[in-house]
Image (cartoon, grey):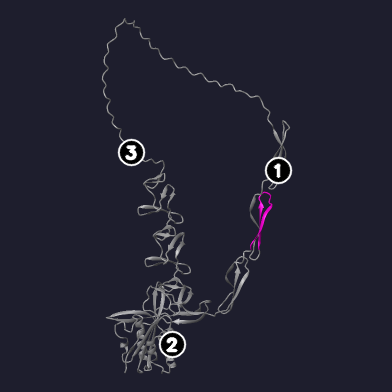
Amino acid sequence: MRRALKVCTVFLLVAILTLTTTQVAKAGTWKQDARGWWYANTDNTYPTNTWQMIGNTWYHFNASGYMSTGWLSDGNDWYHLKGSGAMSTGWLRDSNAWYHLKGSGAMSIGWLRDGNAWYHLKGSGAMSTGWLRDGNAWYHLKDSGAMTVNQWVGDYYLEASGAMAISKWIGQYWVGADGKWIPNYQEPVATKPPVATQPPVATQPPVATQPPVATTPPVATKPPVATQPPVATQLPVATTPPVTTQPPQLVNVWKEVEIKDATCSQAGYVIEKCEVSGEVRRIDLPALGHDIGNWEVMSAPTCNGQGYRVRRCKRGGEILESGLIPATGHKVGNWTASINLTCETDGEYVKKCISCNEILEREERASSGHSYRWDIAKHPTVGVAGERTRSCYFCEDIAEREVIPRLETVNIDRGNGQIETVTGYFDIKGTERIINLVNEERGKLGVAPLVVSENLMRMAKIRVAETAVHYSHTRPNGTQWNTIFPQGAHGENIAHTPSGADRVMEMWMNSSGHRANLLNDEFVTIGVGAFVAQTKREGDYYYQGYYVQVFGLNNI
């Protein structure tokens, strides 16, 4: 009984859509070209527009698949990737400013507690210093970024919360409403009005007494005429009392007649003689003691030998102490090439001491040969062919050049009168390679080879261009895949990958449904289509290969 065989491609390793996701690390290999570093997983896929953990470290890859470095905006957060590509965490200094990256890698903003201190990160992420107003309070951040607490800064005081004190006493100092210390501040004291006193009690007038018996009055005399007060006279000028003089006294006049200076270890003396009385006296001078200087290196130590140092008296230069300086030991540097390793010749690498340049380790490294890869030297355009070269990753030796077919624009029927175009080229070599590989696999099992059908080849060419627009066994216009040639097509395999014909055959052979179609002994004919679509994103060209196999039961 004849029946149409359709196989879904849910197990293909290349996804239909590329989303920005976080991927678990797959063991693979770092690779580099002229544009940057990228990472090849073991299944020949590479991460694009995503985060991926590699060796317990997070990396980010852009839409082109190249490793990101520097600052990166992802969603609502900023991240920083080191020059090595590794995601930064903790404190980071960049362009004279400090930034803080959380454990997740996201840049911190606002207040941050780190250890026993608070820090403030601006909206830009840069660490704040100096005065900062937050809400209704002022704060002060030291040059280190740490918030000032329980401390005066000029005429202002920062409390335990970090907020500037206002309108309060700080010990015996008063700070005003603006937070500034007011010297000699006195709090106003409220006074009470004076207590009203009672008016004095009126007293009775004295009781009149009887007048004395009149006697003959004395003759009244005129009062003396008032005289003017005497004119003030000047005080007498004080005279200086005479100076009392002392009798003259004899004074000794001493003259040094012999001097012996004191040294660090020996006392000295001075002998003086009075020029008046002839008296002689001796003044002893104590020993000065040594004034020990700093260590002085007489011979510097080497990697293998000891050095020698001394300490001298600053006055006499006498050596007071001496000692050996231990050998420094070798400081091993990194591997460097003494004989350059090339793709065709062996090399030699050595490790030298950074201090004395002595060779400490030596290692021969065998040439690994050329590591070739295909690179596009000239991108094709519509009507104009391009070129790609197979060059060595290490020495850039070009082993092979190949023409990339010129591009063409293919119209795809979307149904309801809608037409969509796709640009690319039909890969004739890829088509032939797939047909040969299919028959090789069938031959391994003793299954008859498939015969190329021109009708199925035309159908596969139409279908492969359609899958570049709508990757499905359903056509872009909504009909089934075999409506192009219903009487001759009885099975279809589809796939897409940028890695070429050999890779797509490997994928099909690792899928049970696709493998069943390839090796079905009821199928007689085959048609294969290979189409490489070109897209342009962010100024770069990308190429994706699409592949279709259709199978027939009859040689039609």
Q: Which residues are magenta?
A: 306-326
| Amino acid of disc 1 | Gly
- Does residue 197 show up magenta in the picture? no
* Mark toward the viewer: 1 or 2: 1
Does 315 sit above or below residue 21? above
Circle 1/circle 3 CB separation < 8 Å? no
Residue 452 is situated, as x and y percent measured from the top left of the image, at: 39, 92
Circle 1/circle 2 CB separation < 8 Å? no
Circle 3/circle 2 CB separation < 8 Å? no
Q: Could you tell whether 421 is left or right of 267 in the image?
A: left
Identify the image quadrant of residue 553: bottom left
Q: Of residues 13 and 484, which is closer to you in this image?
A: 13
Task: List the residue tagged with mark 3.
Answer: 190
Residue 354 is situated, as x and y percent measured from the top left of the image, at: 60, 66
Task: List the residue tagged with mark 2.
Answer: 433
Mark sitting earlier along the chain (1/2): 1
Q: Residues within 10 Å of mark 2 (few under 14, many from 20)?
A: some
| Amino acid of disc 2 | Arg
Mark sitting earlier along the chain (1/3): 3
Quarter of the figure that contains the N terminus: bottom left
Q: Of residues 168 and 472, which is closer to you in this image?
A: 168
Does 376 sit above or below residue 453? above
Q: What residue lies at 47% left-to-right and 82% top-to-bottom?
A: 402
Q: What residue lies at 40% left-to-right and 62% top-to-bottom?
A: 108
Q: For mark 1, give the secondary structure.
A: strand
Mark sitting earlier along the chain (3/2): 3
Residue 88 is situated, as x and y percent measured from the top left of the image, at: 45, 66
- Does residue 324 show up magenta in the picture? yes
Task: List the residue tagged with mark 1.
Answer: 268
Identify the image quadrant of residue 456: bottom left
Q: Of residues 396 and 438, which is closer to you in this image?
A: 438
